[in-house]
Amino acid sequence: MSDFNKHPNFEYIRKCYSNPLYGTFFNKTNNELIRIFHDDGWLEFKHESRNYKMTDIRVKALKETQYVGYTKMAEYEKKSEYRISKFKETITYLQQYGSVILIRMPLDEDFLKLENGFFENFDDRMMKISATYNIPYFNYSRDHNYKTYDGSHLFSESAKTFTKNVCIDIKNYQKNQP
C-alpha cells in the first residue's frame, strides 16, 4: 500500500478487499453482514437488520474461513524488524502531538493462540516498547467478553462497548498520572 489517507481508499479496496468491488459500497442484507461506512472512518458491521440476522452457523463458518486464511498467511509471512522499527518511529512522531497508548484488541481464543504462535512473546515485546517510550500498553486480547463475527473483527455492539471501556481505562490511567 502506498496511500493510507484517502476516503474512500480505493487502493485498499482493490488490493485488500476480498469481495467484489461493486459490493464494497452497498449494504447487503442477503447472506452478508450489513456494512455501514461512517464519516469518521469506522466500517461498522451489524449482525442483524430488518431483513437479515447473522446466525451462529454463519459466524462459525466465517471464523473457520478466516482461521484457515490466517494459518496459510502465517506460512509465508515473517515477523519484520523493519516494521517494528517503523512502529517505534511512529510512536516517537505521535508523541510530539500528544499522548500515545498502545492497545491490543480483543479476539477469539483460537485466533489469539494463532497470533501468539506466529509472533511469540508479542506482549513482552509491546511491554518493552511501552516501557522504553514511557507509554501505557492496554492488552485486551484475553478479554473474551466481546463478540466477533470472524474471530478478529468485533460486531458493532461489541465494538461500541469496547470503545467505551477503552475510554474509561484511558481516563482512569490519566487520572493516576502525576
Image: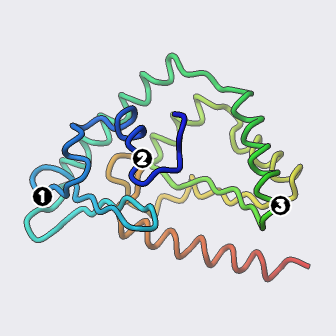
Residue lying at 31% horizontally and 59% vertically, measured from the top left: 45
| Residue furthest top as drawn | 76
Give percent across and percent down for residue 103.
64, 57
Residue 82, image quadrant: top right
Q: Is residue 66 left or right of residue 35?
A: right
Q: Which mark is residue 110?
A: none
Q: Amino acid at mark 3?
A: Gln
Which mark is in front, 1 or 2? 2
| N-term mark: 2 or 3 | 2
The answer to which image quadrant residue 115 occupies is top right
Could you tell me which quadrant the C terminus lies in?
A: bottom right
Q: Position of residue 163 (x, y in %)?
A: 52, 70
Above or below, 100 relative to 161: above
Of circles 1 and 3, the one toward us is: 3
Residue underneath mark 1: 29
**Is residue 145 placed above or below 86 in the rendered structure?**
below
Task: Give the camera-side residue of 165 and 19.
Answer: 19
Question: Which residue is under mark 2?
Answer: 9
Comes first in the chain, label 1 or label 3: 1
Q: Is residue 51 left or right of residue 177?
A: left
Where disc 3 sits, the SS reads loop
Q: Tell which of 3 and 153 is nearer to you.
A: 3
Q: Which residue is mark 3?
A: 96
Marks 2 and 3, how far apart at CA = 27 Å
Q: Which sits in the foreground, 74 or 111?
A: 74
Q: CA distance from mark 1 to mark 3?
A: 44 Å
Disc 2: CA contacts within 10 A as few (<14), some (14-19) or many (>=20) = few
